[in-house]
Amino acid sequence: MYGWTGNILRVNLSAKTFKKETYSQEFAEKWVGGRGFAAKILYDEVKPGTDPFGPDNKFIVALGPIAGIPAPNTGKAVVAAKSPLTGFYGDGNLGTRVSEHLRKAGYDALIVEGKAARPTMLSIEDDKVEFVPAEAVWGKGTYAVNDWIYGRYGKGVGVLNIGQGGENLCRYAVVRSLEGRAGGRPGIGAVMGSKLLKAIVVKGTRTILQADPQAMKILGPGDLKKVGQIDKQTGWSIQSTTGVLSWCNEVAGLPVRNFRKTHHPDAWKIDGERLNNARVATYGCPNCTMRCGITIHDHEGRESELDYENIGLLGANLEIFDLPQVGSLNYLCDDYGLDTMSAGCVLSFYADAIDHGATSGDFAFGDAERAKTLLRAAALREGKLGHLLADGSLRMAREFGHGSEAYAMQVKGLECAAYNCKFIPGQALAFGVAAIGAHHREAWIITFELKHTTRESYGPEKAAKVIELQRIRGGMFEFMVACRFPWIELGWGLDNYPKYFNTVTGLNWSLDDMWRTADRIYSMIKLNYLREFPDVTRKADYPPAVWFDPSNADREGPIAGLVLEADKYDGLLQHYYDQRGYDRRGIPTKTTLKKLGLEEEAAAAEKYGKLEP
Amino acid sequence: MKIRVKLIGPLMYEAGFSEKEIDLPTAATVESLLELIPLSKQRPKIITRNGKAVAPREPLEEGDKVAISPIYSGG
């Protein structure tokens, strides 16, 4: 076996045991790695109905065959578990040196099960695994944990850790690494916290066995250099993702005031130009030559690294148009280990619910200082309000009632990314059918909708585009475990990725093989959903109801008077199902599952929920 | 007629401005506006007029705002 190590490290925190397990070439070629490994392992090992915070849930770190090998942009890892936010499979990816170190220690994945008796840091150094007491940093933020780990092991090691949000089981707590990287939006950090697992440190010293290491040694670093040159030529990383804010503001796609508005005259105050002007440092992931993390001094003078989602959801969506203050909210989320996107949506929902009389409280849009105290309350679960905020917008809405669920900006419990789809049907679909809830990671088709079709269309071309991007973004990049930015932002050819894969593994895959694997993984996650929610209907793939509400239409601007139309959205959803081979509930049919080689998994699902022929 | 032009992301560094008013003859089109802005023709762009997608030969009107952006991917 080349490329893959063929090994998984299984650790049981309750028993303080560990073992190296092997997997077959067949398993490797069927699931490849990252999201593929995680989805399959969780399906096989975590029974439906398992308490996400219980010892039977499993926390997984999964890598792909090119992860950690110098090439564009492979310094990432997938973290996954049954989500405490959404109740089914959840995952995320983040830049981390774990990608290289875990593979050099001899493993492609780590499965953590059970629950530690005391706060613990897992230390992995090649074959050695230690359960290190972590009381010294329990209750500390992620920056302090990083410093503590670097002080003991040096800066070059791979680290994953959580902040107070994960410890206190905030349902949108993330896993953090490298002081600025975060992953696992659907509460994967809280699953670590539920196991009293404060951190993981990994040091690997072996060589990753590759089919043609000499060729890869030339190909990977050479391509990294080329990607860096394209970035310089195009100037992409001057503003990196944050340039999107101005564009969304122009085309009425920016979330403002809990997505009630789509643009704002003060948006320029927090845009990419202002951010770049305020830049004090730039950070990136390992194996990256287009570093996207723009760091500024926040209101309190700390370094805070921002991207578009941060300024969109902690800035515009809260009507906080003060860049240092947005930096402060972002810093607090990063230090507490909270997902900035869900945190922004949770606070905006709270302000909106107060505005609409669904609850009473002391918070209003634009109040940055109060927002800081609310983030703390959520991370520490301080008082009744802290518990409410820590549970996410859907649970809050169910508690508040008064129809507030309509404007809880989430799908399947996961809060929306910073794109206001009040009248962007295709992107609303992309949120609706994203594998884990309303995430932009898997498909973003807004420019396609404006440039290559029409914004008004609910036609099959939009469903096809969502599927195309899911296969690439939510599929290939997530199971190979590489960053999509060289391709999606700089036009780095997709055909490079089978080339890396084949050079490392010795196989002869085409992009079509990648798409088939991607489809298999999407179906796997759908079966996971069906087992957890056997009464599923297509409504689970609907975006927030407020986007269909005519009274919520813009009064001026490019989409004045327009909102999504429910019957047309339903038609678009059906196009997606038809093209995917899913039934009317959005579940793969038996025929589709058979085509993807998922007969065994289908049989396992049928014990819990019905499958259509 | 006066047209407000906004350049987004890296385009503002390429052309040397982020937003300004440009004087154009009546019935000028998006295409003729682009001739006046030093941007690479090869680079794919998305152009909007008052927030709506616009075709290259569409005539502009006094007071229009034209935004020119690279094709973002949503991160």
Image: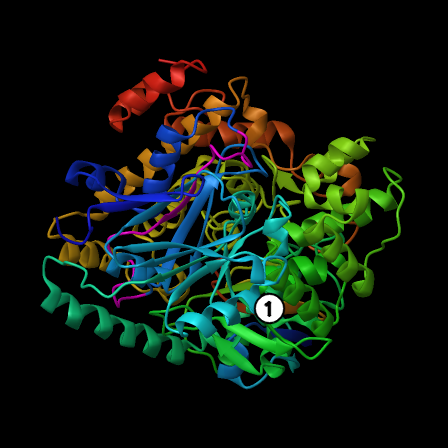
At x 33% / y 16%, what residue is drawn? A603
Residue A365 appears in which quarter of the rendering? Answer: bottom right
Residue closest to the eye, B57 or B15: B15
Residue A66: within the magenta?
Answer: yes
Residue closest to the eye, A105 or A538: A105
Asked whether the viewer can see residue A82, the reply is yes
Q: Is residue A240 above or below residue A414?
A: below
Q: How is the image coloured?
A: rainbow
Q: In x, y percent, where is residue A539?
A: 59, 26
At x 61% / y 78%, what residue is drawn? A296
Q: In x, y percent, where is residue B68?
A: 55, 69
- Which residue is tagged 1? B67
**Mark 1 surroundings: few (<14), some (14-19) or many (≥20) residues within 10 A:** many
Residue closest to the eye, A371 or A450: A371
What amino acid type is highlighted by mark number 1?
Ala
Where, quadrant-wise, is the C terminus of chain A in this rendering? top left
Residue A609 appears in which quarter of the rendering? Answer: top left
Question: Over which residues does the magenta segment extend?
Answer: A51-72
At x 47% / y 68%, what residue is drawn? A149
Q: Is residue A35 above or below residue B21?
A: above
Q: Is residue B62 left or right of residue A370?
A: left
Q: Residue furthest bottom?
A: B16
> Callout 1: helix, strand or loop?
strand
Q: Is residue A559 left or right of residue A427?
A: right
| Dominant secondary structure (helix, strand or loop) of the stretch shown in magenta | loop
At x 40% / y 70%, what residue is drawn? A153
Residue closest to the eye, A546 or B53: A546
Q: In x, y percent, where is residue A246?
A: 62, 67
